[in-house]
């Protein structure tokens, strides 16, 4: 995959007046905050340390929201039981929403240990009127680093990472 934004933090992108700036993602997700999940149904498979939520799932943590058709939460095996949450996988029209931006994708995986969310498939990031599109977006919610990539390469090819940015219009003289 070709990288459009490699190892640049949210702050660096904001300085360049691009979409993924205007506030750190790290400020949006507190790994110590409780996670509130609602859905049409839930199944627990204790032997797999799995909690599967289906049907219009919504997971809230602090001021961050994840919506999807299904969400699976895996916990770490601890002896004969299950320990802390390890990862959360979401599928079917996934939306990751913070106060500053909305991200849409086909699927997402959040790692509790690395505090990283990876959104895959038809990724669209919207902040104000600005938009970025790609195949895969990885965000480190602790550091604010983000990377958007696409499987398509080469000038004039449809499907490459693409962004349309509008200058900050919040300041008037």
Image (cartoon, rainbow, N blue to C red):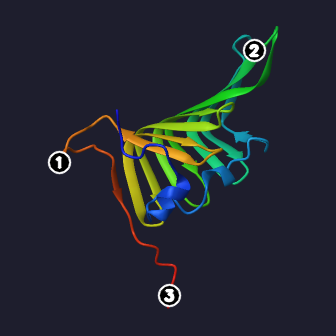
Image position, residue 140 (x, y; %)? 59, 41
* Category of crowding for the residue at label 1, using alpha-carbon neighbours closer than 10 angstroms: few (below 14), some (14–19), many (at least 20): few
Distance between the Cα atoms at labels 3 and 1? 37 Å
Marked residue nearer the N-terminal end (2 or 3): 2
Task: Please give left or right for residue 2 compared with residue 36 in the image.
Answer: left
* Category of crowding for the residue at label 2, using alpha-carbon neighbours closer than 10 angstroms: few (below 14), some (14–19), many (at least 20): some
Query: Which residue is the site of mark 1?
Result: 156
Q: Which mark is residue 77?
A: 2
Image position, residue 64 (x, y; %)? 66, 50
Image position, residue 131 (x, y; %)? 40, 58
Q: Is residue 110 above or below residue 19?
A: above
Q: Helix, strand, or loop for circle 3?
A: loop
Which quadrant would residue 134 be assigned to in this image? top left
Q: Helix, strand, or loop for circle 2?
A: strand
Residue located 46% across and 57% down the image:
126
Residue located 31% across and 34% down the image:
151
Distance between the Cα atoms at labels 2 and 3? 56 Å
Query: Can residue 10 be seen?
Result: yes
Answer yes or no: do the residues labelled 1 and 2 have beta carbons within 8 Å?
A: no
Answer yes or no: do the residues labelled 2 and 3 have beta carbons within 8 Å?
A: no
Marked residue nearer the N-terminal end (1 or 2): 2
Q: Helix, strand, or loop for circle 1?
A: loop
Query: Which residue is the site of mark 3?
Result: 172
Image position, residue 149 (x, y; %)? 38, 40
In the image, which is nearer the foreground, mark 2 or mark 3? 3
Task: Please give left or right for residue 154 compared with residue 63 in the image.
Answer: left
Which quadrant would residue 109 be assigned to in this image? top right
Residue, far top = 80
């Amino acid at each position: 995959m070709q990288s459009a934004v490699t190892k640049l933090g949210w702050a660096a992108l904001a300085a360049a007046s691009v979409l993924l700036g205007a506030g750190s993602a790290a400020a949006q997700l507190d790994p110590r905050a409780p996670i509130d999940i609602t859905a049409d149904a839930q199944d627990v498979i204790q032997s797999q340390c799995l909690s599967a939520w289906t049907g219009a799932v919504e997971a809230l943590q602090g001021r961050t929201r994840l919506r999807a058709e299904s969400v699976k939460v895996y916990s770490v095996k601890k002896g004969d039981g299950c320990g802390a949450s390890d990862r959360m996988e979401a599928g079917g029209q996934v939306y990751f929403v913070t106060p500053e931006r909305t991200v849409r994708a086909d699927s997402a995986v959040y790692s509790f240990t690395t505090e990283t969310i990876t959104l895959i498939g038809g990724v669209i990031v919207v902040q104000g009127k600005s938009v970025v599109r790609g195949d895969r977006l990885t965000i480190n919610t602790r550091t604010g680093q983000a990377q958007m990539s696409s499987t398509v390469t080469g000038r004039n090819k449809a499907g490459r990472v693409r962004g349309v940015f509008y200058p900050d219009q919040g300041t008037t003289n």
